[in-house]
Amino acid sequence: KPAILSYGERARLHKSPAAKALLEVIERKKSNLCVSVDVTKQADFLKVIDVVGPYACLIKTHVDIIEDFDPSLIKNLQDLSVKHDFLIFEDRKFADIGNTVALQYSSGVHKIASWSHITNAHPVPGPSIITGLASVGKPLGRGLLLLAEMSTKGSLATGSYTEEAVRMARAHDDFVIGFIAQRRMEDVGLLENAGESEEDFLILTPGVGLDSKGDSMGQQYRTPEQVVLESGCDVIIVGRGIYGKSDNVDVQAVQSQAERYRTAGWEAYQKRISH
Ligand code: S5P
């Protein structure tokens, strides 16, 4: 088996500005940790991000759950992204026809494309969802992830659906930079990048927790080691495992969890590339 390339080597080879930027941050900060900040108040949102920022390569948002949203939040988020050197991923999960998703991505209250380096979409409408989003995001140097699999119990995104997602990405690799998935998907030919192929999709994986196996609403957790080492994924996405209970942000606890997951993710990666 040929040696797996490091994040830094992959950054140098990558053609997508968004993928390149993410791989560079990962290498620079020695962090493959994406923190998902699913809290509903601006103040908590910014507080958590300021605490976890130094440990994260990427901050994942659901901007539509912020109750007191106003445009200043975006400016503050961007300032934190510069201060702590991370990229921004609005987890919008677009799922409509091309024309509609282009409007949802560019317009409305949130104007996602103007600030989010990376976003994601369900492949369910077919390739037109990619061309719709690309019409807005590509000129801005943004990148798209397709949801090829989900972390939840009973997910329908399996088998031929997952395969079709990979096929769609390959046909649009000028804008699609990778997948939300649970594994490398080598059965559909997604190889660990060994520098022998032009293709280099990133695999970002939610459903990661060290202390819990799931929640009461279908979420399922695996450990960073299972995700990065055993399943060959590139980035771990961790939410409640880090910020805990959103109604009471304990800065000390949030910081130590971020540090813990960052270390676990990076150690799993080091084991993977040394194999
Ligand atoms: O399959 C998925 C895809 C996503 S993007 N499963 C997920 O859980 N997510 C998102 O990851 C979900 O929307 C949430 O924001 C985060 C997981 O949060 P946690 O608190 O369970 O770690």
Image: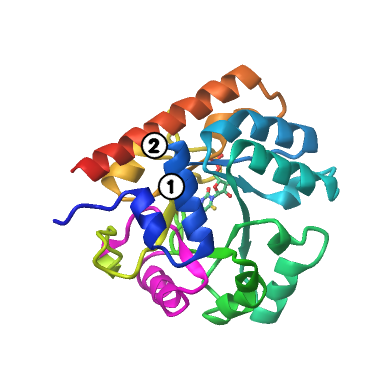
Q: Nearer the viewer, residue 81 or 157?
A: 81
N-terminal of the pair, mark 1 or mark 2, is 1
Labelled pair 1, 2 in contact (Cβ < 8 Å): yes
Q: Secondary structure at mark 2?
A: helix
Residue at which label 2 appears: 265
**Residue farthest along the left direction in this orientation:** 1
- Say above or below: 37 vs 258: below
200 vs 249, left or right, is left
Q: Is residue 220 in view from this perspective? A: no
Residue at which label 1 appears: 235
202 vs 93, left or right, is left
Residue at x 45% of width, y 51% of height: 23
Kind of residue sitting beneath label 2: Gly
> What x and y, as percent, mark residue 131?
58, 80
91 vs 241, left or right, is right
The region drawn magenta spans 158-186
The answer to whether residue 64 is magenta is no
